[in-house]
Image (cartoon, helix red, strand yellow):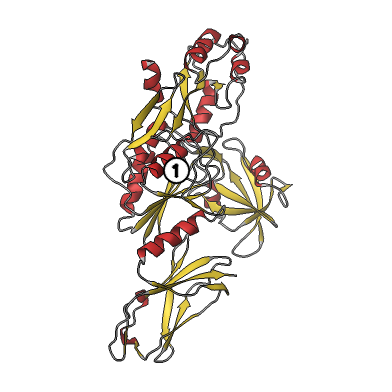
Amino acid sequence: MHHLKKIISLLVVLAFLSDVPAVSAAEPMDEIRDLVKNYYVEDVPDSVLAKPTAKEITEQLDPYSVYMSPEEFAQFSNSIDQQLVGVGIVLDEDVKGIKIISVIQDGPADRAGLKAGDIIVSANGTSLVGQSTQTAVSVISGEKDTTVTLTYISADSNQTMTKTIKRELIKLPNVEYKMLGGDIGYVRLNSFALDSSKEIINAIQKLQGAKGWIFDLRNNGGGYVSAAQEIAGLFPKTEYAFQLRDKTKQPEVYKAIPQKVHFTEPTHILINGYSASASEMVSASVKEQKGATLYGQNSFGKGSMQTLFPLSDNSLLKLTTAHFFSPKGMPVHKLGVTPNVETPEGGELTASHRDQLIAEFNGYQKMPALKDVSTDKIFTVEMNMKMNWSDLKPDNVQLIQLGGNEVPVEVKVADEYKMTVVPKNKLQSKGKYMLVIHPKWTSQSTKKMQTGIYLEVTVK
């Protein structure tokens, strides 16, 4: 078992790997049978071990145990490391076709001039109007160095345009980060790759001055166990990473790997039904040790861990060798991780950002919300006494889009009692905002504002 533990410390893999075909020629069946018998997380009947091919054996195990040729393993490793062949666009369905949600910086589509908001109506002559994103991906994707011709409606001009773009190997950003309005640091991890903790530390350092943190694990299917241990060490109060139980059923608790840089409190983690495997390891551990608050929906429920066994013919056997639990033994497999704060699907980030801002403006008075305002809304602030507006500064008022950035505003004096807040950009339809007025002003009798105020705004 010592050999197994050395390998276990290195790997756990994506939850959503599709079943891959076995190589038909000269599979090392004796090796495969010995590994399954000795290391698979459950006892396997002799009738299964007697099957003539690796595929027939692994089909009788769980969905995550598969036999891979060297080529199939290379594809699998690329999926963890966020590499793919394509034109570099993220898509969503739209009534007019397939909408581009984002464009990978410096990718083929970006260089060709495509932008977020463009709507693709056909690819290589195949109409995508009324089609699913899965259909669109199957048509737009293809082999490296081949081309695809996209016809799309430009978001800028509303004109129909056509571009022929070469498909390339694209390295997707595994860690994305930005400072949200109100100085809330946002870090998204797409996969638990080997260098993920270093990339997250870099993001934390780049976002110095953050007053709270949001760590996004939505749609993150997992990755390497070592990455999960390192990332758990980024959270306050989190001493342990997870508990493993192999076929002996004996629990073994693994510590988080301490890091020199940490998320500071308050910290939120976002999860959803597609957060799986290593994402659930970190979420369960941090929740249990109160290192962060979880927002979202119940996670996927993949509490099994796979080990990669190299075989004598250079193929590999990916085998489920353990189940993982929270450090104190709470099960994850088939149950998932329950968030502290349940939100609607798609509303995780706005709910988390809202609560981060409310914590930041602790003691401010909450005013009645404004609902269904127009995209060109002008806000009027009226005081109950004559004000000294001469010291009025623009940063005394903040309009923050929840889940996004601060909106620049112009503050204008209307009269001695009243001033207006004019957004310099139109508000986003269906968007949610927070208007914050800081206690920096005085009345004409030099009476100071006692507390700041905030109110929530929704746009129709």
Residue 453 left/right relative to 31: left
Q: Amino acid at mark 1?
A: Asn
- Residue sticking out furthest to the left: 260
Up/down of 254 relative to 115, above or below: above
Residue ID at (58%, 9%): 46
* Residue on which disc 1 sits: 174
Q: Residue 370 location, x and y as percent?
A: 53, 74
Which image quadrant is residue 68 in?
top right
Q: Residue 428 location, x and y as percent?
A: 55, 67
10 Å neighbourhood of mark 1: few (<14), some, or many (≥20)?
Answer: some
Residue ID at (44%, 33%): 325
Q: Residue 139 location, x and y as percent?
A: 67, 42
Which image quadrant is residue 395 in?
bottom left
Total labels: the figure holds 1
Residue ID at (37%, 90%): 385
Residue 69 left/right relative to 162: left
Q: Nearer the viewer, residue 2 or 222?
A: 2
The quarter of the picture where the C terminus appears is bottom right
Q: Nearer the viewer, residue 323 or 231?
A: 323
The quarter of the picture where the N terminus appears is top left
